[in-house]
Image: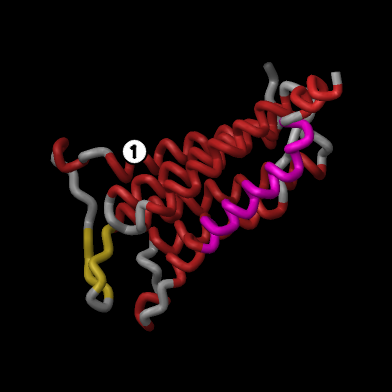
Amino acid sequence: MKFNVPTKLTFLRLILSVLIIILLIFPFYRVGFEFKTFLFHSILIDVRYIMCGIIFILASFTDYLDGYLARKNKQVTDFGKFSDAIADKVLVNSVLIIFASQGFIPAIIPVVIIIRDIIVDAIRMNVAGKGVVQAAKMSGKIKTASLMIGIVLTFFYNLPFELIGLQISKFFLYFGSLMAIVSMVEYYNLNKKTLFSEFDDKTKK
């Protein structure tokens, strides 16, 4: 199978996501390597998180770029839509889980996001089996963008806002979680007729 440029960018995002995961959870100290740390206004900065933040920004940019190129060059495909959604989830959800396990963010954030994704994906698979393909909605895009901003700020220790006591990173993460619930409800409302069509048909018979 020959992939177009947008799909190649999607796979690049997956590769960058795996790289971030490795950097965040691999026990480098066991192989005799430690990342440098330094103090900045009483905040202990681990260079590893700065590196991951830069990689995350690059991966997030591919998310914008692959969609833009797909629309511009009329290369939007069903496979592209599904693979793009998967790449987004791997990039965002894996980082949220790691952040929660390391105590950077409350565990409720990845829990809400993952439950939402499970429900929305179940709806997508159900309606796809009936010939309906649902692309990402605006609420879902706002959710993803908010989470990405919150994650980037978390990677960079919420700077410069941390210096004045504003938890902007957590604001975007909580707002993204709220939009996740909104988009889940939207997906359900848009597809509930298709979801329950077989039951309606049986009732009519």
Tell me the residue that label 1 is attached to: 22
Q: Which residue is drawn at 78% across and 35% down?
A: 193
Kind of element beneath mark 1: helix
Q: In this view, does 95 lie to the left or right of 6?
A: left
Quadrant containing the N terminus is: top right
Type of secondary structure dominating the magenta stretch? helix
The reply to whether residue 9 is visible in this rendering is no
Q: Which residue is drawn at 29% across and 48% down?
A: 101
Image side of residue 35 versus residue 134, left or right: left
Say left or right for 171 vs 139: left
User: Vertical placement of 112 versus 170: above or below?
Assistant: above
- The one of 194 and 55 positioned closer to us in this rendering: 194
In this picture, is 137 found above or below 158? above
Relative to 107, say whether 89 is above or below. above
Count of labels shown? Answer: 1
Residue 189 counted in the magenta span: yes
Percent across and percent down for residue 162 are: 36, 75
Name the residue at 19% across, 48% down: 34
The colour style of the image is: secondary structure
Q: Give the range drawn in magenta.
A: 175-195
Q: Measured from the top left, where is residue 156 in percent x and y?
A: 39, 63
Q: Where is residue 199 in the image (x, y as percent from the top left)?
A: 75, 25
Residue 29 in view of the camera: yes
Instruction: Give, as a three-letter code, the residue at label 1.
Output: Ile
Figure quadrant of residue 118: top right
Residue 108: image location, x then y, percent: 40, 53
